[in-house]
Image: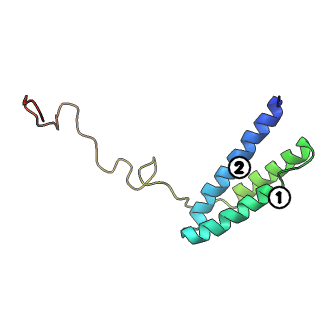
Amino acid sequence: MLSEAVIAHRVRVMRLYRHSLKQMASWAVQRSLFYVEAEKIRSQFEANKNVPTLGEAERLVEAGEKQLQDTAHPDPYIVPYFVGGSSYHRNPPFPKEISTHHNFGREGY
């Protein structure tokens, strides 16, 4: 069975990988460029997959997290309907008192 430290390290590596890809999506807007850069990121992770000690692996993750912070996009892409996106709360919701259902008691509609 895996120790808690190894499991925590794996989660940390997965998060670093996911955040690296999300950040790359802000820099490489065209999908063709994104796929090339994503392949480079994947190859970096694969190259360090079989590091012999947990201490060395921790140092690699810390270096990756620092690199991620250093190369952060100044205006990251945000999905339009997420908080901070261009379409988030663009139209205010209808008040609860107003019914948008026009079935005035007729069956079958």
Q: Few, some or many C-alpha atoms within 10 Å of disc 1 (few <14, some 14-19, many ≥20)?
A: few
The number of numbered discs placed on residues in the rendered structure image is 2
Q: Is residue 7 visible?
A: yes
Which image quadrant is residue 37 in?
bottom right
Name the spot of residue 100 as percent of width and height, x first: 17, 38
At mark 2, the secondary structure is helix
Q: In this rendered view, identify the residue nearer to me: 62 or 107.
A: 107
Amino acid residing under circle 1: Ala
At 76% from the left edge and 35% from the top edge, which residue is drawn? 8
Q: Which residue is mark 1?
A: 47
At 74% from the left edge and 46% from the top edge, which residue is drawn? 13
At 35% from the left edge and 47% from the top edge, which residue is drawn? 89
Quarter of the C terminus within the rendering:
top left
Q: Earlier in the sequence, mark 1 or mark 2?
A: 2
Q: Is residue 73 visible?
A: no
At mark 1, the secondary structure is helix
At 45% from the left edge and 48% from the top edge, which residue is drawn? 82
Q: In this rendered view, identify the residue nearer to me: 11 or 71.
A: 11
Q: Which residue is mark 2?
A: 16
Proximity of marks 1 and 2: CB atoms separated by less than 8 Å: no
Seen in the picture, residue 75 relative to 18 is either above or below; the reply is: below
Q: In this rendered view, identify the residue nearer to me: 84 or 6.
A: 6
Q: Quick check: 88 left or right of 29?
A: left
Q: Few, some or many C-alpha atoms within 10 Å of disc 2 (few <14, some 14-19, many ≥20)?
A: some
Name the spot of residue 30 as percent of width and height, x first: 54, 70
Quarter of the N terminus within the rendering:
top right
Seen in the picture, residue 17 relative to 30 is either above or below; the reply is: above
Which image quadrant is residue 9 in?
top right
Tag on residue 96?
Answer: none
Seen in the picture, residue 31 relative to 65 is either above or below; the reply is: below
Name the spot of residue 39 as percent of width and height, x first: 69, 64
Looking at this view, name the residue that lies furthest to the front: 108
